[in-house]
Amino acid sequence: MLRIPASVKPYVTIGDSQAAFLEALIDDWHILADLAFSDLILWVPGTDDNEFYAIAQIRPATGPTALEDDVVGEVISYETEHLVTQAYLSKRICETSDNKLQAGIPVDVWAIPLMIDNTCWGIVERHTNQMGVRAPGELEDHYLETAAILADMAWRGAFPDQGHTRLTGISPRVGEGLILIDTAGVVEYASPNAVSVYRKMGLMSDLIGEKIVPLTSALMNRTGGPVDTSLAAHFKSRLSEEADIETDSASAFMRILPLTNRKGRVGTLVVCRDTTEIRRKERQLVTKDATIREIHHRVKNNLQTVSALLRLQARRMKSTEAQGALEEAMARVQAIAVVHEILSYSMSGSVDFDDVADRLLKLTADLASERGHVNARRLGTFGEIPAEVATSLALVITELCQNAIEHGLSEGGGTVTVTPSRHDDGSIEVAVIDDGHGLPDGFQVNDTTRTSLGLSIVTTLLQDLHGDFSLVPNPTGVGARAVVRIPL
């Protein structure tokens, strides 16, 4: 989405097509800035026919800036003798080459109208600091020649191209590597950094004079892997493209732009970046992520084994009290196992807790089946819960549901409802409500936590989470209502 400064928004009207075009320009205009050794300002016409507003600015990475101050948000008037006004009215590129002084620095200025269907959608003003002009050489000559082509394309509405696709990553800068290719696909020029990129990928010969597609394909296929058949299409496309190149020794990311004049295509511009280290770190992250998920999976399996052992032990207990204690322990272990199972499939550091809660409620209802039919249900949504909170919250809900079934519901069963809600302050509130016979007269939570293991566990866990807990009669007059609130 095109970002327009808040101070400018009330004074400009930009349609969807115009916004998409200007946004695409800002994606790649650093290439023009670096090639031209120039600062660029993007001006758009205001709703008032006598004004232009600056909505974006970029400085070159290849030379000194000509604009010390940020001009985004500034306004100029048609009534002023300004190059932007001249370019807008004439619909042609205008320039001053008399070394105009800006803050005491001689600066050359160009104004490039962005013409789409004979309508000016904006003006790119180009400022070149003549005090920092680099000594002419092969690299500088190719930079400036290519900048002139891109400026002409911008004027004709061909840069960015009408089929521009947004980059999946950050576009390489010109200084990271530049390759110019002729219409036959042969490399005409490669900057020293571009040659270095290809050297790291295994190139032993010269890059200039080689056909780019066969050469790159040979480097990619050196390990005997499949050839990227889309590579040729990337370089021949009439639209801007991007390509990830990977060999057995290095990798690179390329931004590929067709170069055209009024007669047609005149070549291809490639800006490339060495991404070897980035890819290595990405692979490390993928490996670590897979390892963490495997750990969660194994922890879940081990906890399920512990739960099964507790179940076997409970069946052999003759004491009803001991059997109940083991079943409660089994439920706690299974609650933790559920969280680890969900985390083993998660690609992020959070958990879809609705799934966790539904499994816990089914588990709780199944364990309480001997007391009669228990309907455990959820109303509302938890959303994403941070992984470091999920285990404790799962245990809290399990304990409160078990407490509601054991102490609140009658032998015939009943309903336990878990109602989560999010608050604007970032906290989550969870109410566990039963329709049982309610709390005894004079009930105090603080007194009960001394004798109830379940409520003691809840209180301890909530202290660690900096949350609070209350257990009061249900406002409807039937059953009890336990409420926990946790800051996330």
Image (tube, helix red, strand yellow):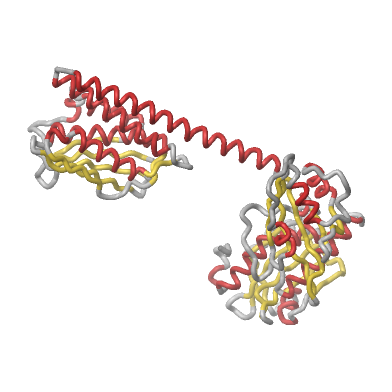
Give the position of the C terminus as an image quadrant: top left
Rendered location of residue 422, percent (x, y) = 33, 48
Residue 463 figure quarter: top left
Q: Is residue 74 visible?
A: no
Q: Is residue 81 above or below residue 130?
A: below
- The answer to whether one can see residue 292 in this image is yes
Instruction: Depth check: give the residue in front, 77 or 411.
Output: 411
Spot occupied by residue 144 in the image (x, y as percentages of width and height): 85, 62
If the image is split into quadrants, where does the N terminus sit? bottom right
Above or below, 343 relative to 305: below
Q: Is residue 267 left or right of residue 368?
A: right
Percent of width and height locating residue 432: 22, 41
Q: Horizontally, is 485 left or right of 297 in the view?
A: left
Instruction: Give the camera-side residue of 211 and 256.
Output: 211
Left or right side of 486 for 404: left
Residue 212: percent from left, percent from top:
80, 56
Query: Looking at the image, which residue is at 28% across and 33% down?
Result: 396
Q: Is residue 438 above or below residue 229?
A: above
Number of labels in the image equals 0
Question: In the image shown, does 205 or 439 lie closer to the viewer?
Answer: 205
Residue depicted at x 62% and y 81%: 49
